[in-house]
Amino acid sequence: MTQLRSQRLNQITHEPHSRLDAAVKAQDPFSSRENFARFVQAQYLFQSELQPLYRDPALVQLFPDLPTRCRAAQARDDLADLGAGIPAPVAGAPEGVSRAEALGWLFVSEGSKLGAAFLIRRVAALGLGETFGARHLGEPEGGRAEGWKTFTRLLDGLALSAEEERQADAGALAAFERFARLLQHSYATENA
């Protein structure tokens, strides 16, 4: 049986995903609200950079609910709850990505909502949750699992050339690299 595109993307991003998980754990974002705010700043930066993809008319044709899936506004509200500033953009944001590359970026962003189910439980100890301080980790409308299934069903159903498949792979790998860079930046910055 042929491997689905979402399965292949999951497979090729396994190693960078593991590295990113280790990097997040090393920063101990759940040790304090201040430390968690730095994590949220990285999330905000990443989601803000992806807003153009979530609003792209060609991509919205493929994924009709795409504009409602972006979590930049929730992360911004979380930062306000936490008394943390909105971080300045960091050089190196994705620009001019092809439609196929964008699919890889969106795959990573949407997939992170599954992991958010575990993170939202951790922030409860800090007095945070889906309505204060951790909105961006909240349960998407319709549920995490159903939202992911809908996204991957549409993603897997797209007809792509071999070159576009390579671009989607490159986009997914670049997304993990970018979030790792933003995470490092957020924790390295003074006065978060």
Image: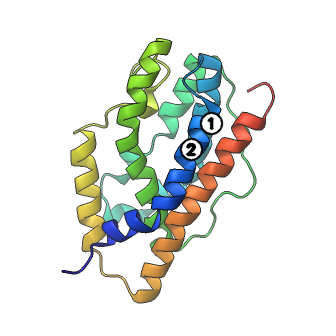
Q: Residue at x 50, y 77 (%)?
A: 167
Mark 1 in CB contact with mark 2 (< 8 angstroms)? yes
Mark 2 neighbour density, 10 Å: few (under 14) some (14–19) many (20 or more): few
Q: Is residue 141 above or below residue 84?
A: below
Cα–Cα span, label 1 and label 2? 6 Å
Q: Give the amino acid type for the residue marked by disc 2 in the picture.
A: Ala
Disc 1 on helix, strand or loop? helix
Spot occupied by residue 162 in the image (x, y as percentages of width and height): 41, 88
Query: For this view, does 64 lie left or right of residue 26?
Result: left
Q: Nearer the viewer, residue 40 or 58?
A: 40
**Rendering quarter of residue 63:** bottom left
Q: Which structural element holds mark 2?
A: helix
Nearer-the-camera pick, 45 or 2: 2
Residue 184 in the image: state x and y as whole percent.
Answer: 70, 43
For label 1, count other residues whose C-alpha is less than 10 Å away and answer few (under 14), some (14-19) or many (20+).
few
The three-letter amino acid code for the residue at tag 1 is Ala
Query: Which residue is the site of mark 1?
Result: 26
| Disc marking residue 22 | 2
Q: Using the rendered view, name the quadrant where residue 22 is placed.
A: top right
Q: Residue at x 62, y 55 (%)?
A: 178
Q: Is residue 36 visible?
A: yes
Establish if 133 lies above or below 158. Answer: above
Q: Position of residue 118 (x, y in %)?
A: 38, 33
